[in-house]
Image: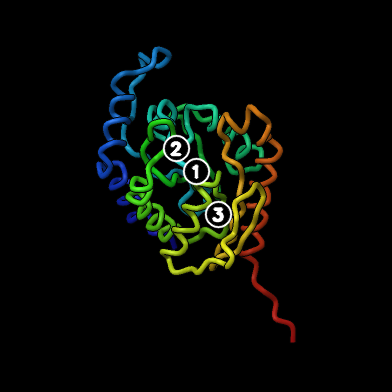
Amino acid sequence: MVDRVALTALETEIVACRRCPRLVEWRERVARDKVARYADEPYWGRPLPGFGDPAARVLIVGLAPAAHGGNRTGRVFTGDRSGDFLWAALHETGFADRASSRRADDGLTLVDAYIAAAVRCAPPLNRPTNEERDNCAPFLVRELALLTEVRVIVPLGGFGWDAVLRTLAVLGHERPRPKPRFGHGVEATIGPYRLIASFHPSQQNTFTGRLTAPMLADVLARAGGLAADRDRPTLIQQ
């Protein structure tokens, strides 16, 4: 059973984090010196906790919030084009009750899916340093430990893939050797988890066609099927 009190306490701790001076200064400056198109909107300007169904069997792990996306709206993958691409696929595959997410209080609901980021603050140029990555890593470790129903993990992009491998190692799950290499649709089993990777839904990937809507939907549908399969008891033949 998921300890929802502990998960809420972790979310509160994440939001209050000020561990990385460069990220704190950047996220707060972006929230203060707003771009013209969002000049009249309040900005969140803090780290982002995960979002979704605490009883989810599928965990999706991205890189970090966007400066004018999650850093503005207060919810991961919300208010930017990467998020628009992801939510449409989540809706198509039955994980989300609507195809778009504009702000944290819009009522959107995820079913059987939970979304987190490897780094919880918006980094300059979308590039956290290794130290910032490592400072944030314990949050994902603790989050996954609390999400006890998760069976399948979908890392988005190579950064998310590596973050998930490191997280599982900390939790005591030895990774296969050689190390599984990232690639769209690549699968691996580590401990009790099945991993299936996707290219990140960044504009760099979606505008160039490296990642298409059907490609992302196929990965999410596969994740849902794997989660269901891993919940079925194994038949022991006599």
Identify residue for label 1.
Answer: 62
Which corner quadrant holds the N terminus?
Answer: bottom left
CA gap, disc 1 and disc 3? 11 Å
Identify residue for label 2.
Answer: 76
**Image mark for residue 50:** none
| Percent of width and height locating residue 72 | 38, 27
Q: Are marks 2 and 1 in contact (CB under 8 Å)?
A: yes
Report the amino acid beneath label 1.
Gly
Q: Is residue 53 left or right of residue 200?
A: left
Report the amino acid beneath label 2.
Val
Q: Quadrant of residue 227?
A: bottom right
Q: Earlier in the sequence, mark 2 or mark 3?
A: 2
Report the amino acid beneath label 3.
Ile
Q: Quadrant of residue 44?
A: top left
> Dot 2 lies on which element?
loop
CA gap, disc 2 and disc 3? 17 Å
